[in-house]
């Protein structure tokens, strides 16, 4: 008798880009059988997310450093680095193996969603509200700020 796999980790944030969502969902599918595989896939997800955020997407450590130089909040940097380091440790011999504590891998899903919320969903929501301001008010704001406001 076949039974479906238990998927006991959170689904991808609704604003997760499709290029990232497929790896995230694959990580969810394999999590119960292989937390190591899930962690490695989530690391791949944030590498692609760095590319989505305008970085090269080739060297995740350099991408994070570049984002930090551009003002990335400390908590987001730490979340990115946690997923990067834990994911790396699963595919390279290291000291942190999520087989010893699968809850670490489970928490990576939350971190990826936190990063998407901070870097994609929240700015999108704010931009949407800003665009609903009367055009005359937006123009006055842009003039006040020396045309630095993006509309």
Image (cartoon, rainbow, N blue to C red):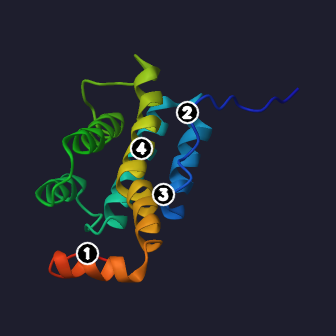
Which mark's residue is nearer the viewer, 3 or 2?
Answer: 3
Residue extending furthest toward the right: 1
* Residue under label 4: 112
Q: Is residue 27 visible to the viewer in this orientation of the structure?
A: yes
N-terminal of the pair, mark 4 or mark 2, is: 2
* Residue under label 3: 20
- Give percent across and percent down for residue 93: 27, 32
* Image quarter in which the C terminus is found: bottom left
| Circle 3 SS class | helix
| Circle 4 SS class | helix
Give me the residue at 58% from left, 37% from top: 30
* Image quarter in which the N terminus is found: top right
Mark 4 to mark 1: distance in Å?
Answer: 34 Å
Q: Nearer the viewer, residue 49 or 131?
A: 131
N-terminal of the pair, mark 4 or mark 1, is: 4
Mark 2 to mark 1: distance in Å?
Answer: 48 Å
């Amino acid at each position: 008798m076949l039974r479906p796999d238990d998927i006991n980790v959170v689904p991808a944030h609704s604003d997760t880009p499709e290029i990232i969502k497929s790896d995230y969902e694959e990580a969810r599918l394999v999590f119960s059988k292989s937390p190591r595989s899930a962690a490695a896939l989530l690391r791949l997800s944030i590498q692609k997310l760095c590319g989505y955020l305008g970085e090269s997407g080739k060297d995740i450590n350099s991408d994070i450093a570049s984002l930090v130089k551009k003002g990335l909040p400390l908590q987001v940097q730490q979340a990115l680095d946690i997923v990067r380091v834990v994911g790396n440790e699963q595919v390279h011999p290291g000291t942190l193996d999520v087989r010893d504590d699968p809850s670490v891998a489970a928490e990576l899903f939350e971190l990826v969603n936190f990063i998407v919320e901070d870097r994609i969903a929240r700015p999108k929501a704010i931009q949407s509200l800003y665009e609903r301001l009367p055009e005359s008010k937006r123009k006055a704001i842009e003039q006040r700020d020396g045309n630095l406001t993006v509309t």
